Amino acid sequence: MLTWAIISQKGGQGKTTLATGLAVEATKELGSDTVVVLDTDDRQATAAFWEERRPTKDVLIVNTGLAVMPLNHKRARDHGASLVIIDTPANSRDIATEAANLADLALIPVVPRAFDIASVMQTVKQLKLTGKPFAVVLNQVKATGREGGDTEALFADQGVTVLKTRLHDRKDFSNSGAVGLSVTEFDPKSKAAAEFLALYDEVKRLSGFNAKRLRAERAA
């Protein structure tokens, strides 16, 4: 079983959109009921909101607090999950650390704005202490301007991996989430869908995701 954690101490970076979108793409490859999203945000429960509106129940969302996160992670493994995605809240250092410790790969979404970048830098420092592999995802990038490139260079100068794929500021991302869909389901031919599929492929490569092996492990 693989585990991906979506972590940022700053709110509004698109963590849940990333978590649910990745879950949908992985489910297409691995099959229904093989991907579990652990929603650790007990205040907003955005992933649970998404699940309630989803027309199909192929992705399992489990609400979990810090104390039971390791237990629910183990339960997912014991029940045959191939992939767990941990969606973390803002402003919770303890949850972020625990999620990183459980993860094979952590992703830090960041909107290229000055205050957002400054807050996310604290997440970068925190993840470096865990020793787990992680990468930055540039999200809600404006179509024009230097912010995306400047932000990528800033993280790269600190030796931080930045995914080549950028998710731009497109309405399809928010519109799809409101009806319980991923952006690739909402409009498969859109630019937003193409960007997300490219990002998904990058995440798979970084984490060593192999659908055939994961299916075999589940069947064993």
Image (tube, grey):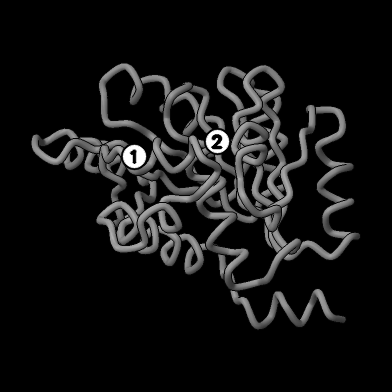
Give the x, y percent position of residue 72: 85, 43
Seen in the image, is 150 located left or right of residue 166? Answer: left
Q: Residue shown at 49%/63% (left/top)?
A: 206
Seen in the image, is 214 located left or right of residue 74? Answer: left
Residue 160: quarter of image: top left
Residue at mark 1: 139
Q: Which residue is the extreme one toward the front?
A: 55
Front residue of this view, candidates 121 and 203: 203
Using the image, tell me which numbered label, if any, was put on residue 41. none
Q: Residue shown at 77%/40% (left/top)?
A: 62
Give the x, y percent position of residue 158: 33, 40
Please identify the quadrant where the C terminus is shown.
Answer: bottom right
Q: Amino acid at mark 1?
A: Asn
- The vertical placement of 220 against 157, above or below, is below
Going from N to C along the chain, the mark reached first, 2 or 1, is 2
Front residue of this view, candidates 101 and 113: 113
Badges 2 and 1: C-beta atoms under 8 Å apart? no
Disc 2 is placed on an element classified as loop
Residue 175: quarter of image: top left
Disc 1 is placed on an element classified as loop
Residue at mark 2: 7
Can residue 86 be seen by looking at this rendering? Answer: yes
Q: Amino acid at mark 2?
A: Ile
Can residue 1 be seen by looking at this rendering? Answer: no
Q: Residue shown at 57%/70% (left/top)?
A: 208
Camera-side mark, 2 or 1? 1
Q: Residue shown at 48%/39% (left/top)?
A: 177
- The vertical placement of 176 against 59, above or below, is above
- The vertical placement of 125 against 180, above or below, is above
Dot 1, crowdedness within 10 Å: few (<14), some or many (≥20)?
many
Residue 198: quarter of image: bottom left
**What is the distance, in whole Å, between disc 2 and disc 1 at their CAs?**
13 Å
